[in-house]
Image: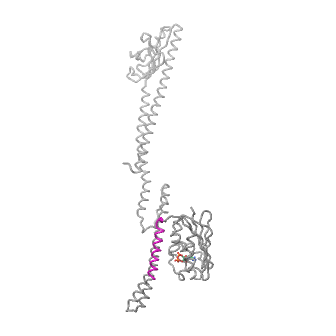
């Protein structure tokens, strides 16, 4: 029912407020009542004690009878005014009223007497003037017999005070409740307005305006990190989109050349009737070009597949030594063809969990590059080692080297250093495949290179 944070907040706040305020009101009411009663009781107590000690004293002096008359007539102040709400009366042990304050006597009234009570007893009664009274009763043993002294004071003022307190509380409560409720409603409204603006802004962002950002300046402190985090995420998405777009452009660009070669060969050949040799030549070119195209498409699919999701690798124990030695044997004829010497230095057995096919593919790429970008009479050294829990495999060459400005970009898709473009064939995808395979194995690759001297690609795989 209350699914919004705003309504929950308001309900929680107002119910807590009502509970605390009502509890506090009830507590204060009873505290106040207790204080007022205590003060009346202590007044009644001293009144009764005073009368008792007065009687004892007079009894000692033998003025007992006169004194009773005096108590009934000579009282002053509130005790002398008829039904003033301030009374006392003395009752003998046979239940007869032997003296009472003029405030009772004038009106011919008395306080209710229910028998002797040796300990002081307090109770609330309805007095002769129909008003609420607090009455104290206590009996005292005198030589003339037991005398019960009763004193009572009106509770009118006390009840009036409590009623006023009640009224104040009952007036303040709804006002405070309304003010607080409206306040919370407005504050939550303001806060959530910012959130609403924020979500409206998010909804407007599509792939067409990914460069837009949410304005976090002037935003509520609590929302700022959300906006900033969202902007960072937008940045990542924008980069990914840009890379994707570039990839598409580069891929189509790369595929355009072989496609036009095939098309123009077909056009030229089909223009007129040709001899068998000419057809053969044309078909050979078309076959070679479509093979290159197929290999390029395979590479593109490889890169896209390797980078787009968690690569599903066949995990097995891979013997790096045997992979490198197979690659060495495979590449030896190609190296010889290019007048390049190739060496394999691996004296330690290295085994690690991985995908044998993919790891073979990555080292073929690196060795192939080391031959491709080498010089006549140059060398390629394949070496492997174990260092700090890592298998370290280095492919070093004595080739053209990589300019510093290019060394961080050569792992990007379709990137080729300027010098390689014209002179050596390639699509610029090999190293991005290499990097993706290494990363899928939680490994790293580094390159150290000097232009004109050579390059060394260092691959590191965690052994465990
Ligand atoms: P390709 O070889 O098809 O161009 P790669 O992704 O394998 O694509 O390499 C990207 C670029 O990195 C190459 O074009 C080249 O400029 C540079 N490169 C790679 N390996 C070497 C190397 N061993 N020596 C010099 N340059 C290299």
Q: Majority secondary structure of the magenta segment?
A: helix
Identify which residue, 102 or 276, lies in the foreground: 276
Image position, residue 338 (x, y; %): 57, 82
Q: Which quarter of the picture shows residue 385?
A: bottom right
Quarter occupied by the C terminus: bottom right
Image position, residue 328 (x, y; %): 57, 75
**Residue 431 sits above or below residue 120 on the image:** below
Q: Would you say residue 179 is visible in this rendering?
A: no
Looking at the image, residue 397 sits to the left or right of residue 159; the answer is: right
Residue at the outermost left position: 1
Looking at the rendering, the quadrant in which ligand 1 lies is bottom right
Query: Count the marks: how many?
Result: 0
**Residue 304 sits above or below residue 379 on the image:** above
Identify which residue, 126 or 231, lies in the foreground: 231
Does residue 304 belong to the magenta stretch?
yes
Looking at the image, residue 91 sits to the left or right of residue 457; the answer is: left
Image position, residue 325 (x, y; %): 57, 73
Image position, residue 264 (x, y; %): 42, 86
**Residue 455 sits above or below residue 27 on the image:** below
Does residue 343 belong to the magenta stretch?
no
- Report the magenta residues as a range: 288-312
Looking at the image, residue 132 sits to the left or right of residue 317; the answer is: left
């Amino acid at each position: 029912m209350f699914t919004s944070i705003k309504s929950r907040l308001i309900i929680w706040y107002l119910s807590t407020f009502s509970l605390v305020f009502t509890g506090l009101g009830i507590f204060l009411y009873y505290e106040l009542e207790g204080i007022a009663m205590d003060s009346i009781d202590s007044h009644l107590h001293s009144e009764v004690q005073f009368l008792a000690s007065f009687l004892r004293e007079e009894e000692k002096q033998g003025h007992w009878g006169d004194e009773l008359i005096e108590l009934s007539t000579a009282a002053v102040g509130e005790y002398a005014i008829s039904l003033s709400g301030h009374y006392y009366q003395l009752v003998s042990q046979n239940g007869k009223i032997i003296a009472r304050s003029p405030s009772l006597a004038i009106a011919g009234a008395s306080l209710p007497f229910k028998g002797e009570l040796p300990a002081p007893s307090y109770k609330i009664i309805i007095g002769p003037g129909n008003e609420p009274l607090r009455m104290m009763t206590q009996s005292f043993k005198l030589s003339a017999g037991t005398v019960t002294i009763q004193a009572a004071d009106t509770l009118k003022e006390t009840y009036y005070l409590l009623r006023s307190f009640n009224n104040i509380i009952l007036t303040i409560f709804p006002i405070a409740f309304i003010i607080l409720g409206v306040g919370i409603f407005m504050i939550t409204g303001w806060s959530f307005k910012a959130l609403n603006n924020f979500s409206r802004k998010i909804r407007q962002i599509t792939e067409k305006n990914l460069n837009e950002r949410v304005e976090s300046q002037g935003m509520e402190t609590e929302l700022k990190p959300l906006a900033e985090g969202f902007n960072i995420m937008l940045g990542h998405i924008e980069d990914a989109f840009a890379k994707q777009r570039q990839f598409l452009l580069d891929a189509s660009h790369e595929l355009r050349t072989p496609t036009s070669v095939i098309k123009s060969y077909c056009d030229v050949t089909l223009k007129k009737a040709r001899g068998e040799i000419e057809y053969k030549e044309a078909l050979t070119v078309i076959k070679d070009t479509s093979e290159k195209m197929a290999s390029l498409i395979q590479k593109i699919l490889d890169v896209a597949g390797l980078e787009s999701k968690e690569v599903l690798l066949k995990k097995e124990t891979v013997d790096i030594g045997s992979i490198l030695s197979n690659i060495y044997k495979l590449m030896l004829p190609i190296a010889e063809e290019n007048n390049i010497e190739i060496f394999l230095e691996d004296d330690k057995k290295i085994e690690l969990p991985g995908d044998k096919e993919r790891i073979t593919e990555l080292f073929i790429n690196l060795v192939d590059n080391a031959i491709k970008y080498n010089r006549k009479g140059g060398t390629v050294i394949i070496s492997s080692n174990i260092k700090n829990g890592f298998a370290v495999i280095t492919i070093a060459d004595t080739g053209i080297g990589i300019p510093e400005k290019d060394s961080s970009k050569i792992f990007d898709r379709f990137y080729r250093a300027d010098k390689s473009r014209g002179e050596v064939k390639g699509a610029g995808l090999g190293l991005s495949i290499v990097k993706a395979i290494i990363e899928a194995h939680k490994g790293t690759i580094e390159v150290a290179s000097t232009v004109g001297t050579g390059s060394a690609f260092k691959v590191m795989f965690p052994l465990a």
